[in-house]
Amino acid sequence: MKICDTCGNELPDDIVTCPFCETRQSPQSTVHPPDAQTGSGKRHESSPKKAGKKRKTAKIPEIVGPDDSLNQQIMDVNLKAGKPRVDHALNLLDIKIHEAKLQGIKLIKVVHGWGSSGERGQIKAALPSHLDELKHRRVIRSYLPGEKYSNTTPQGQHIISKYPGLQSTIRSDRRNPGITLIEI
């Protein structure tokens, strides 16, 4: 299995276009189940092995970013990687928000999924009340559920005008119920 760069959904290795967000997939790392002895999962290049070349292995990144294009700093956080329990996912999000603040990052794109993998979207369901609490405590400024993220909604237009770096993903992320944007 591999993970879509854009929406974070698990995909079969042979998929060229993600059926969830419709973005073309580049040859990327394949996620293998945890090793029985070490308990750690490994990633391997999914492109065919070339003669005489060694396969590369790397850890699965939790953060992809910050994206410094157009002087905007945007951090991507994948909460559904590894299928954590809801409380662990929310704790991870709190840690990433704190890290983002320390790094001067102003926007976090959270990939939480929406229940398509049979997990019933528990992280997605718990996120709004958690973010409301963080907003009330002034830990975050605002958040925008993926369903409302589009260049045709007032909320989407506002956040895109504030963070032009989002322009590059508006096509793949628009109205995506598996993401949430958090403004710090």
Image (cartoon, rainbow, N blue to C red):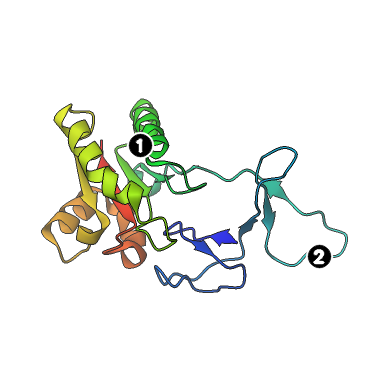
- The Cα atoms of the two marked residues, 1 and 2, are separated by 41 Å
93 left or right, relative to 3: left
| Residue at point 44%, 61% (across, down) | 117
Q: Residue furthest right?
A: 52
Q: Quadrant of residue 119?
A: bottom left
Q: Which residue is mark 2?
A: 50
Q: Nearer the viewer, residue 20 or 160?
A: 20
Is 19 situated above or below 3? below
Residue 60 in the image: state x and y as whole percent: 58, 46
| Residue at point 19%, 57% (across, down) | 156
Q: Quadrant of residue 85?
A: top left
The quadrant of the picture occupied by the C terminus is: top left
Residue 76 in the image: state x and y as whole percent: 41, 46
Q: Which residue is mark 1?
A: 90
User: Mark 1 or 2 closer to N-term?
Assistant: 2
Classify 10 Å Cα crowding around label 1: few (below 14), some (14-19), many (20 and above): some
Per the image, label 1 sits on a secondary structure element best described as: helix
Q: Nearer the viewer, residue 62 or 82?
A: 82
Per the image, label 2 sits on a secondary structure element best described as: loop
- Of tags 1 and 2, the one toward the viewer is 1
The quadrant of the picture occupied by the N terminus is: bottom right
Residue 142 in the image: state x and y as whole percent: 18, 41
Residue 122 in the image: state x and y as whole percent: 34, 49
| Residue at point 67%, 63% (across, down) | 46
Q: Amino acid at mark 2?
A: Lys
